[in-house]
Image (spheres, grey):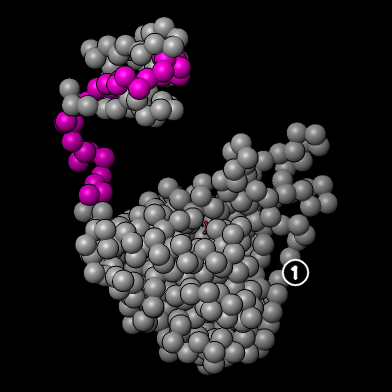
Amino acid sequence: MADLSVVFAGMHFPNPFMLASAPPTRTAEMIKRAFAAGWGGAVTKSIALDPAKDLQPRLQPLHHGKRKIGMENVELTTQLTVEEWQQEIADVKDAYPDRPLWASIMDAPVEGNWQRLAEAMSDAGADALELNVSCPHGMPSKGMGAFIGQDADLTGKVVSWVKKVAQVPVVVKLTPNVADIAFVAQAAMNNGADALCTVNTVSGLIGVDLDTLTPMPSIGGVSTYGGYSGPGIKPIALRCVAQIAKATDLPVSGLGGLNTWRDAVEFMAVGASTVQMCTAVMWQGYGIIENMVQGLNDYLETKGFGDLRPLIGAALPKIVEFPEMPLAPRVRASVDDTCNGCMLCITSCADGGFQAITGIKGEVVTIDGEMCDGCGLCAMVCPLGSITMVPR
Ligand SMILES: Cc1cc2nc3c(=O)[nH]c(=O)nc-3n(C[C@H](O)[C@H](O)[C@H](O)COP(=O)(O)O)c2cc1C
């Protein structure tokens, strides 16, 4: 077995897989079941001084064919009180003293509120505080969540308030719904953050019901902008993790669209040293941890890595700004004899490319290397993998 353990902001994790702050960490009983299944750590559902009353229903999936590719939610904070959460945290820590449990806290930008939450949670035994300054729906209208995280100065202020009283590491959960996440990350770092975490959900409007012309999820005939999560947001999340890992020297916990161990490897390659999951667990349950751990272990062994260190951040030096991208090597499309002449590439190249492919249905297509501009569209649409990009 490879060594999957990791030290994050001074905390020892048996493996890098954490449950994100979300429904799977709603109670101590749930978190303990997840730890029994093998999760390396967990972040509680976000705790505020005033527990929220939630809308019903509050989840809406997005399908591509029969597959779910994302989900929107309009859920708010925990429904438990601060005192109830103190008991829940103590209960989990009693049963699993060695498994990191972070308390997610959120409130309006009032110094005393954040400090009360921070003290209550670290007194109860939380190993770290995750500052939710990133929820995009419901909370911003009360000056909470992304209202704070979309303002670098305010984010820095909240971090400095919490740092004044915090006895445990402070992790700041950033929103992807900003023009420059690196700028906000630096404000958090400069005000004392011990670590960063991203992404929270992406602000979205998931769809409109064609029969009633009501946006979804329809609640009493109306809807609102919500938080989009799941596989569809992974590229946004990877980009955010890479940007904050490059812009700061803080440890990063990465999340957003993780579904398999392969996704975890990608997040770690762009700088995450722990990863978190929410939607995949809501859809498939805590048991997915087995495949995550096994897959990551097998990958490390195949690569000849004894532990996670050679993986974390390995791809970062290979991410450059656009003007630094090379104009060589130049490539063109090439087709092999597995092509069955389905014509998909011809249509795509004709209407979305450079009109470089011709052919007769059922026969191997012909690619004109001079007309081909090397964009890669044909290779993408070929259902058989018969087209590859080769050096010019
Ligand atoms: C129903 C639901 C409730 C959530 N509640 C919280 C929350 O209380 N605090 C928080 O920081 N993030 C919350 N999130 C965001 C997740 O922690 C996570 O950042 C986001 O869903 C992206 O990860 P995923 O694609 O693995 O779901 C919630 C997400 C969902 C779907």
Of the pair 123 and 94, the residue shown nearer to us:
94
Closest to the observer, 10 or 55: 10
One can see residue 21 in this view = yes
Horizontal side of 314 relative to 263 (left or right) equals left
In the picture, the quarter occupied by the C terminus is: top left
- The outermost residue toward the right is 220
Quarter location, residue 329: top left
Could you tell me which residue is drawn at 18 percent across and 36 percent down? 326
Q: Residue 13, how many percent across, how many down?
A: 39, 78
Residue beneath disc 1: 53
Residue at position x 22%, y 27% in the image: 390
Give the image location of residue 308, x and y in percent: 28, 68
The image position of residue 29, as x and y in percent, is 64, 81
Does 356 lie within the magenta span? no
Residue 331 vertical position relative to residue 33 in the rendered view, above or below: above
Secondary-structure class at tag 1: loop
- Residue visible at 72% across and 49% down? 217
Q: Position of residue 125 (x, y in %)?
A: 51, 90
18 with respect to 211 (left or right): left
Number of marks drawn = 1
Who is closer to the viewer here, 294 or 308?
294
**Along the line of sight, the residue nearer the viewer: 117 or 212:** 212
Instruction: Judge the density around disc 1: few (<14), some (14-19), many (≥20) Cα neighbours within 10 Å.
Output: few
Pick the quarter of the image with the N terminus.
bottom left
Q: Give the magenta-colored segment's residue range.
A: 318-346
Task: Report the image quarter containing ligand 1.
Answer: bottom right
User: Is residue 322 positioned above or below 249 on the image?
Assistant: above
Task: Specify whether residue 333 is painted magenta.
Answer: yes
The quarter holding residue 323 reads top left
